[in-house]
Every structure is written in C-alpha cells, then in structure tokens.
Image: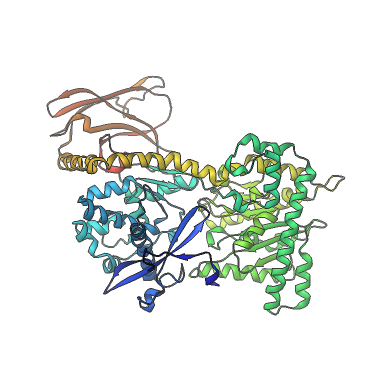
Amino acid sequence: KFSFLPILPVRDDTGNWLKVSLAFPGRRVFAKIWKIDVGRVPLYLLDTDIEENNSDDRFITYQLYGGDHENRLKQEILLGIGGERLLHTLGIHADIYHCNEGHAAFVGLERIRNLVQEQNLSFHEALDVVRASTLFTTHTPVPAGHDVFSEEMIRAYLSEYPTLFNISWEKFVGLGRVDETDTHEKFSMSHLAARVSQEINGVSEIHGSVSQEMFRPLWPGFMANELHIGYITNGVHYQTWTAKPWQLFFKELFGKESVAFHPDENDWEKILVMPDEKIWEIRTALKRELVNALSEKIKSDMTRRHENPREIIEVLNSLREDTLVVGFARRFATYKRAHLLFHDMEKLKHITSLKDMPIQFLFAGKAHPKDKAGQDLIKRIVEISEMPDFQGKVIFLENYDMEVAKYLVQGVDVWLNNPERPMEASGTSGMKAALNGVLNLSVMDGWWAEGYLPGAGWALPKENTYDRKDFQDELDSEMLYNLFEKEVIPSYYDRNEDGLPEKWIDMIRHSIANIAPKFITRRMIAEYLEKYYLPMFERSKKISLDNYKEIRELCEWKKKIIANWGAIKVLDMALHDSAHKPLPLGEDFHAEIVLSLGNLKPEEIGIEVLFIQKKGPDEPKEIIYKQELVISKKGRSKATYETTFPVTQSGVFEYGFRIFPKHHLLPNKMDFNLVKWV
C-alpha cells in the first residue's frame, strides 16, 4: 500500500536521497526526506526507518503516539531541530514560523544556534530575532496535551546547546520552566514555545482566556487578562468537508465558482428564501448516503466479530433515513464526556422508545493508546449498544477514520458535543456539520460559544453551576434528556401536510446562513494574516536590517536597564487617599509620583496605575482600568510622572502602580519582563 501513496523522495542534483542528521547520545541519527503536494502546498516528511539507524531510532517515525516518553522526546527533537535542518538543506528561508502546540518548539533552539554560529549574534540577540518571527498557537487546556521531560533526559539529548549558546546549563534548561532555579520542575515544551515566540494565541475566544490563565505564571507582575495571548477561532476547509450536493447548490445559488473564495454574508443569506423542498431533498439524500455506507460497514464489522445473524439483521433494519440520527464522533478523551448520555439509563431508554418518534445515536472515535480511561469508555458504549433495550438505537462504529467522519458530519441530523467546561479549546467537527445543514447540540464552549444562535441549534449553558464534577454531570445530563424529549425530537417529527418538518428546515437555513460562513478556513487564514503574520513579518524584517543593527542596540539597552533596575526608587508620591476617603463618581483621580532613575532616562521608564477587582470569591483578579502616567518634570537622575482622569465606575477596587521599561522596539511589555510595583 505504501508504494501507491502520492509521496516522492527528495533527491539532490546527483540523484542521492536527501537526508538530515542529528546528534543523539553516542550516535548520529539520520532521516530521509519525503515530499507530498497537498494541493499547491508542499508537505515535507522526515523518516528515520532507514539502514543507517539502529532499531530503536528507526522506530522514531513509525507511530505518532508509539513508544515511551524518551521516544516522544526524540520525535520532538526530530520535528523541531530536524525540521529546521530540512528547510536549511532545501534552501527554504521562512519569514514566519508558526508553531502549532509546543511539540515543534525545539525549532527555536536550532534557529538560535544558526544565528549564533552564522551571524555572530549573542544568545540574547539571536533569541530576540527568533521571537520576532515566531507565532505559537496552543490548542488544548488539557495538561496531557503539553509534553514535559525530566532535566536528565533533556541533558542527555541537548547538552551541547548551552555551550553553543555560551550560556549556563541553568539558563538553558530554565527556558522550559516557570522558575529556572527550580530543579524539581520539569522541562515543558509549551513553556519553551512561549519563551521563543513573540506572539501566542488560543483557538477560540474562551480558549484565549483559558490560555492566559494557563501561561500567566511565566510573566509575574501581570494579570492574566492583559497578557499578549490572543485568539483566532479555528475554521474548516469548505471544499473538503462540504458535501457535493451542497456545493453544487451553493454554486447555483450564489452564482460563483466557489463560496470558499468569497464568503460574503449577503450571499449566504440567500438560502433563507429557498424552498423547503430543496433543502430537505439535499438533507435526505445525504442521510441516504450515510445509511447505505454504514449498512455495509456495520454488516462487515459484525460479521467479522461473529455476531448473532438475527442481531445483525435487527441493527441493519434500524438504519433508516426517516429516523432522527444523532452523531457523536471524536477522540475519546474523558473530558469530552461521551458517557454523559448514559448517566441515567432509564431516561435514555424512555427517549429511545418514544412512540412513532425513533432516535438513533451513532458513536465513533478512538482513544489515545495510553488513555486507559478513554479505552474503557469505548468498551462501555459497545456494551450498552449490545443491550436489548438499546440494540440498533445506540451504535458504536469501529475504525473511525476520515471517510467515516465525512459520512457522519454530512449525513446525521444532530451533532452532539458535551465536553467539560472550559476544556473544549475549539472543536471543528461541529463546524463541518454546520456546513452540511446538520444542527448542533453542544455545550457553550469552544467555537459554539461564539457560533450558537437561538433557532439554529441548541446549547447547554456556558458556565458550570457546581464545582463538583459529578453534580455538574448530573445536571448536564438532565438538561440533555430534556432537550431531546421536549425540543429536538418533537421538532424533527413535526411535519406539515407535505411531510416536511418546517421548523427543522428553518433551523437548517439559519444555521447555514448565519453560523457556517463564520467558521471556514478562509476567515481563519485572513485573521492570522492580518493579526499576526503581516505585523510580525514587518517587525522581523525591520530588526534584521544592517546586520541586525536594531536588535543589537535593543539588547545593549536591555543590559543597561537590568544593570540600573535596582536603582529605581520612589522619592515622593501624591495621590487620592482612598483608604480614608471614597472618591465620588465623576470626580478626578489624580496621582503624581517622583522616581529616582539612576543612570536611566525618564523616557526609558514607564509607570501606570491599575485598578483591580475580584468579581467573585472564586474568581481571579481582573484589571478594570489601566492608565499610563506621563512625564511632567525632568530633573537630574529623577523624573515626575502624573495622571488625572475622571472616575466613571462605582465599586470597591484595589489599585497600584506598576513600573516597567519602555523602548519603541519592544512588541509588548511582556517581551522584557521587568516589573516593580508601588
């Protein structure tokens, strides 16, 4: 089968297969380079399964999640360091590096090494150059998704890098720690990625906030909600995931070659006036394709398992295009709560036995090879599917792959998603479903918190009601049963004289017109380009001019600031005494602070006042208002900073003054994390 893949070896001018090599403990490891053209984009792959390597190293690229923790480290060294050497070997110069998750974070180390050795930059200069052109996208708040390694393992594989960088081992290993002096703290790939990246983003609005809290310890002195961590909500590829009948329909409706290249909201809204018959015709055709495909698959799977022939026939007879079908397909991590539907088996039995209103639940997915809890969850669903009460009503589909996924997101009626809050970073399967007229029923987390519209799907609340997980699961399952019984099932089976579910079709219209177009790849790429790629490219290009003149000057300035930071002192302070007298709304808050600056210039230091409030006993502190003071007087080695602004919000607040370094080349305050609080 491998020989039939659309993959080609990459060779040099003399026909030799191109390879990269890495130094591993006591040996060198080699990886040959393959190329796949994904449309117009070349994808390069590294393969260690070659004769030059020993059996352990040949296994590195055999399986993504295979092997032990050490093999995982070897994979990430190959991906990051080997990946950069691959680009170097092919003569490819990248303007911007986009690191998805921390798994490729070692690319930053290799880039620093190249700059130190080839451009004669210091470690700190090279680090600033690398940071300026690196974006780090974090994809999960789940701790298991962020790889960590022991110091001993890092030393075994990367011991030469501190010498190459001319820094101490403690400084080097500290790149992957919150506290570089804490020898008990493991080396985090995500912390390394954050340290070698100028910009960081989550993959939905909620996940952006969750990521701010998650990475806040890296920048002491700053509140989570002011960190330079933003978000860009994921999108899905229109042509890949939208069924052909819908694509043809949209082409006819919009009068364009492809809606993917022109996602105009006015175009999408044309579907709001399309006849019910046309929309239902497409949905029925896709349901029929799903039923036909699954019938063959289930028959084959059950026969292979030597199931009872009568049971096979019963399950196959249950697959009908006039039955309400609910899909749940994803990785079986426990936080995704595939078990929620089975919290109360009697209520589930009641829902699946409603007279003349059949409902069928299709489950599919795989668990991580080392996730025993996820594997047990799959086993439990399979057991339930074989119970007499649920046979043909709950079905687990084996060997979940992209083909099965496409049939499901295009053919089911409802897409179910009920993760623990706020653990769903984004979620894309529901976006794919929405493109195909499938209605979403989901927790208001990830993308659905931004996408949900009343009358175009259903939602469980955004906030948890209980701290206890079992209580919250019970509440959510009750809401789930209630939604199915009172809203979802009746809406699907409420038909007019022509046999059409008018309310259901109207929900499909609004889902496609008002939700789907906001979550396609084109929108996502445009946001990355505008928010990150172009500004980072301009800054990176600017600081690299004249043999990195500006970055060398910036690093010299940083040295001066560090040397004089301890000399900064508050000489005098005049401000509203809120401890004894409240400040009425509409009156001005005034502050005047005199600083001793040592050998620093007043313009090199900023000071700002922050008003902070805790909205609840279990809530983190948030910045309500922030105002930078301006320089009003300059003296010899000292300066006066002041501000005046009206009070526009009532309440009880904490406030304080934060001193920080200022330079026009700093992209943000966290880039040079020196802070003094007054």
- Which quarter of the figure has residue 14? bottom left
Q: Residue furthest bottom?
A: 306
The structure's colour scheme is rainbow
Q: Quadrant of the C terminus?
A: top left
Q: Is residue 490 visible?
A: no
Front-most of residues 465 and 529: 529
Residue 553 horizontal side relative to residue 622, left or right = left
**At which x and y percent is residue 205?**
49, 43
Q: Residue furthest right?
A: 497
In the figure, 184 relative to 235: above or below?
below
Residue 192 horizontal side relative to residue 143, left or right = left
Q: Residue furthest front?
A: 14
Q: Residue furthest top?
A: 587
Picture residue at 46% right of the left edge, 58% below the top: 43
Residue 424 horizontal side relative to residue 437, left or right = left
In the figure, 414 relative to 398: above or below?
above
In the figure, 234 relative to 588: above or below?
below
**At which x and y percent is residue 137?**
43, 50
Front-most of residues 334 and 665: 665
Q: Is residue 531 visible?
A: yes
Picture residue at 55% right of the left edge, 52% below the top: 427
**At which x and y percent is residue 100?**
43, 54
Residue 459 horizontal side relative to residue 188, left or right = right
Picture residue at 62% right of the left edge, 62% below the top: 403
Front-most of residues 14 and 62: 14
**At which x and y percent is residue 504?**
74, 46
Front-most of residues 36 and 280: 36
- Which quarter of the figure has residue 271? top right
Q: Quadrant of the N terminus?
A: bottom right
